Amino acid sequence: MERANKIKVGPGLAEDSNMGAIVSEAQMKSILNYIEIGKQEGATLAAGGYRHVDDGLDKGYFIAPTVFTDVTPDMRIVQEEIFGPVVVIQKFKGEEEAIKLANDTDYGLAGGVFTNDGAKGLRVIKKVRAGITWVNDYYPTYVEAPWGGYKQSGIGRSLGKYGLDEYQEIKQININLDVKPVGWFPN
C-alpha cells in the first residue's frame, strides 16, 4: 500500500509522472464503479480508491492507484477485468491453491508470478491460463511476441508473426499434375 501511495499521478508528458490519465470519461466511471462494488462486497480498501482532482488534475480522468485486500474469489473485483489502476491482493496456501485462484475466472489476459525460486516460477506460470505472462516482472512486452488473452480475454493474437496471421486468409491448394483421370469413380 505504501508503494501505491507513492506513485505520482499526473499528465503523461510530465517528467515526474509515474501514471497518467484514464483513456476516457466512460472508462474512468467504469473503474470508479468497480471500486464502489469492491467496497460494497466487503473488500478492504487499503489504498487509493478515488478520482484525483488536486494539483490541477480535475480536468482529466485521473484515478489514484487502488489496492484492495481481504477479498474473496467470488467478488466481482476479483472475477472481472477492470482495466484500470486497481489491484486485489488474495492470500493463498501453497502453489496449487495459487494456480487455482489465478485460473478461477472467465478471463485470462495477463498474469505474473513473483518468487525467489526460478524453477517454481516457471512451473507455476506454465499452469496459469493467461495469454501474456511474466515471472518476476510485469508488463514489459515485445512487438515480436504475440499479444492476446485466453478464455474471454481478447480474440485472436496481435503483434509478431501471430498478429500478421490475423490479417491473412489462408487456404489449402492441392494440385494433381498428372492430368489424366484419377480413378475415383468407375467410368
Image: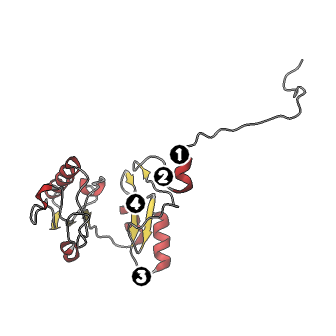
Reading the image, the residue beneath label 2 is 158
| 107 or 93: nearer the viewer | 107
Q: Which residue is drawn at 76% across and 36% down?
A: 174
Q: Which of marks 4 and 2 is in front?
A: 2
| 160 or 42: nearer the viewer | 160
Tell me the crowding category of disc 3: few under 14, some 14 to 19, or many 20 or more residues within 10 angstroms, Cα based.
few
Q: Is mark 4 on a helix, strand or loop?
A: strand
In the rendered structure, which disc, 2 or 1, sits on the residue that comes first in sequence? 2
Picture coordinates of residue 68 (x, y %)?
Answer: 20, 65
Q: Is mark 2 on a helix, strand or loop?
A: loop
Reading the image, the residue beneath label 4 is 110
Question: How did the renderer colour the structure?
Answer: secondary structure
Q: What element carries label 1?
A: loop
Tell me the crowding category of disc 4: few under 14, some 14 to 19, or many 20 or more residues within 10 angstroms, Cα based.
some
Reading the image, the residue beneath label 3 is 116
Reading the image, the residue beneath label 1 is 166
Pointer 2 and pointer 1: residues touching (CB < 8 Å)? yes
In the rendered structure, which disc, 4 or 2, sits on the residue that comes first in sequence? 4
Picture coordinates of residue 120 (x, y %)?
Answer: 47, 76
In the rendered structure, which disc, 3 or 1, sits on the residue that comes first in sequence? 3
Left/right placement of residue 111 relative to residue 13 reads right
Q: Which of marks 3 and 1 is in front?
A: 1
In the rendered structure, which disc, 3 or 4, sits on the residue that comes first in sequence? 4
In the rendered structure, which disc, 4 or 1, sits on the residue that comes first in sequence? 4
Instruction: Give how far apart the Cα atoms at labels 3 and 4 are.
Output: 20 Å
Outermost residue on the left side: it is: 54
Instruction: Give how far apart the Cα atoms at labels 2 and 3 are.
Output: 31 Å
Q: Which amino acid does label 1 sit on?
A: Glu
Tell me the crowding category of disc 1: few under 14, some 14 to 19, or many 20 or more residues within 10 angstroms, Cα based.
some
Instruction: Give how far apart the Cα atoms at labels 3 and 1 are.
Output: 37 Å
